[in-house]
Structure formats: structure tokens, C-alpha cells
Image (spheres, grey):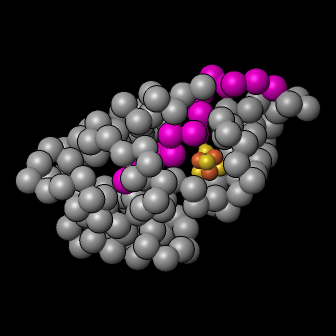
Amino acid sequence: MTYHDWFTQHAAKHRDIVSRLEHLSDEEVIAYFRYDNMVEHEPDFCPLYAKGTRCHEMEDLNCYLCACPHFRFRDEGIGVEEGAVVKSICAIDAPGGSQSKHAEVIHHNCSGCTIPHTDRYIRRHFDRDWGKIMRECEV
Ligand code: SF4
């Protein structure tokens, strides 16, 4: 599956969940997307739920802004660095991010960054239209 395909499917899943939460306030919607609640009520949202694992070990991990609106990915490549094709980058060059190189392909590694997973960050960028947040954070 390409990143574009995953992104499109993920957007549809996000839209479906949010459409079922119309009766909740914005703050309640944000709370709904906390990891523990999502594992229980939305087991198909993320493949890690079924494995009992999570992308980041942090308190109150919130899944509302997965994928991160600052993540940029192009299957055909964004550029070339030292002979390797760069397929993904962080648009804000967040300090927790890093690069990982495998077989002449460089991917951005977000495992050390928790920026989009905090309630505070999500409140600041909140919109029930997830795609709109993604578009507004594009640079
Ligand atoms: S490093 Fe952090 S801010 Fe940058 S794309 Fe990854 S999760 Fe988002």
C-alpha cells in the first residue's frame, strides 16, 4: 500500500468516527480520541491497537492527529540526499524527529516526537474536518 492509499483510507476512518460523534462537544471529541478509549471503542482505527502496542510511550496519548499534519511524504520521492531518495520529511523540522536510511531510501522517523499527540496541540489546531487541519498545516 502506498502512503497516499493509507492516508486516504485513514481520512475515511477518521471522518466516519467524527460523524458519529456529532452529539459531543469539541472537548469530548478530543477526549474520545485518547488511546485507551480508541482501543476499546474503535479497534480498527490503528493496527497497533490489536497488538496492544502504541506508537509513543507517553501519558494521555491522543490519536486525533495521526497522521501528523507536519509529515510530508511522496512515494516518488521529495529529493535526493547522498545518493538516497528522500521519501518523507518533517515540515517543521521538529527536534524529536530523525532520518532513517534503508536501501538507498530515507524516511523521516517520528518515533521520538510527540508533538501531534497531546491534547494541547490538538485543541490549538482542532477542526472536526481532519483533512482541513492537514491542508492548513501544509507549507
Ligand atoms: S517529527 Fe513530529 S512534528 Fe515532525 S512530522 Fe514527525 S510527528 Fe510531526
Residue at the extreme right: 82
Nearer the observer, 16 or 5: 16
Residue drawn 14% across the image and 56% down it: 24
Residue 93 appears left or right of 70: right
Nearer the observer, 125 or 43: 125
Vertically, is 90 above or below 53?
above
Indicate the position of residue 75 as horizontal and vertical percent values. Answer: 59, 28
Is residue 51 one of those drawn in magenta? no
Is residue 75 one of those drawn in magenta? yes
Task: Name which quarter of the figure residue 126 lies in.
Answer: top left
Looking at the rendered image, the quarter that the N terminus falls into is top left
Residue 19 appears left or right of 81: left
Image mark count: 0
Nearer the observer, 132 or 16: 132
Residue 93 appears left or right of 115: right
Vertically, is 58 above or below 101?
below
Residue drawn 8% across the image and 53% down it: 23
Vertically, is 112 above or below 78?
below
Residue at the extreme left: 23
| Magenta stretch: helix, strand or loop mostly | loop
Residue 59 appears left or right of 40: right
Indicate the position of residue 134 as horizontal and vertical percent values. Answer: 44, 34
Residue drawn 34% across the image and 67% down it: 34
Can the viewer see residue 10 in this picture? yes
Residue drawn 54% across the image and 28% down it: 138
Looking at the rendered image, the quarter that the C terminus falls into is top right
Indicate the position of residue 101 as horizontal and vertical percent values. Answer: 78, 46
Can the viewer see residue 49 in this picture? no
Q: Which residues are magenta?
A: 64-80
